[in-house]
Amino acid sequence: MVRAVVFDVDGTLAETEEIHRQSFNHAFRDEGLDWEWDRPLYAELLATTGGRERILAHAHAMGETVDAEAIHARKTRIYTERIKKGSVALRPGVAALIDHARRSGLVLAIGTTTSRPNVVALLAATLGPGSESLFRSIRTGEDVRTKKPDPEVYRLVLQDLDLSGAECLCIEDSRNGLLAARATGMRTVITPSIYSTGEDFTGADLIIPDLSHLKASSEQWPNSSLI
Ligand code: XBP
Ligand code: MG
């Protein structure tokens, strides 16, 4: 029996990675770095979760030493300002699923690799002021030592909810997220995003283009009160 819906953020709630990519490049220019992450390179770099870790991985590959903390802090400021201006909308079906889950008495939570300011800005810009309170638990990159595909962030969410993985439905967009969710025993719905399409989603309970298809797939989703 599903008692909670646990959402990933980037690529799942909204197609945010293109704004992240542009914000990284803006931060590199402001920091005097001659780096430019184009779409194909960024798609490769996304294998490393966490913006700070991604910067460090690229610096290592380039044989350079950089102040990743400062660059990432600047990038986060740039990103949150763009999100606050309404640069991105929720993906299809996300708001409806949140509403349906609440009306069904299900608990909502978030488990993400991204930074907390990014989540706060995205929720306010898309679900309105105070929307953080819709979520019983919001766990972000700052809360963990090891990021997805490590399950740490989702284990923290399950602890906060006092639920087992088997009682929770996780909505994800990437293989890293799928692996993290499955390691906790959560059932998984994958909605591939622009940057994650084509990844290996073996082991997912359901793979659909976006959450607006969830109802149409109810026959594929046994004994869930959710659909
Ligand atoms: C996606 C990530 C994040 C973002 C960038 O997180 O891996 O690192 O790409 O955000 P998720 P930060 O899909 O788990 O929401 O720069 O704040 O890390
Ligand atoms: Mg994601």
Image (cartoon, rainbow, N blue to C red):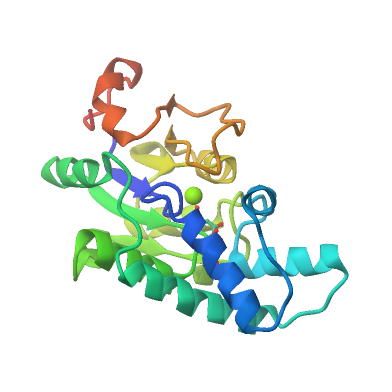
In this view, the residue farthest toward the left is 103
Q: Is residue 92 above or below residue 200?
A: below
Q: Position of residue 115 (x, y in %)?
A: 48, 69
Q: Is residue 227 left or right of residue 197?
A: left
The image position of residue 204, as x and y in percent, is 50, 29
**Where residue 29 appears, x then y in whole percent?**
64, 78
- Count of numbered circles in the view: 0
- Give coordinates of residue 78: x percent, y percent: 47, 76
Image point (24%, 50%), residue name: 107
Q: Is residue 25 left or right of residue 189?
A: right
Above or below, 95 against 142 in this view is above
The front one of 126 and 225 is 126
Residue sitting at x 22%, y 28%: 227
Is 184 positioned to the left or the right of 58 in the image? Answer: left
Quadrant housing residue 200: top right
Quarter assignment of residue 206: top left
Quarter of the picture containing the N terminus is top left
Q: Residue at x 50, y 43 (%)?
A: 181
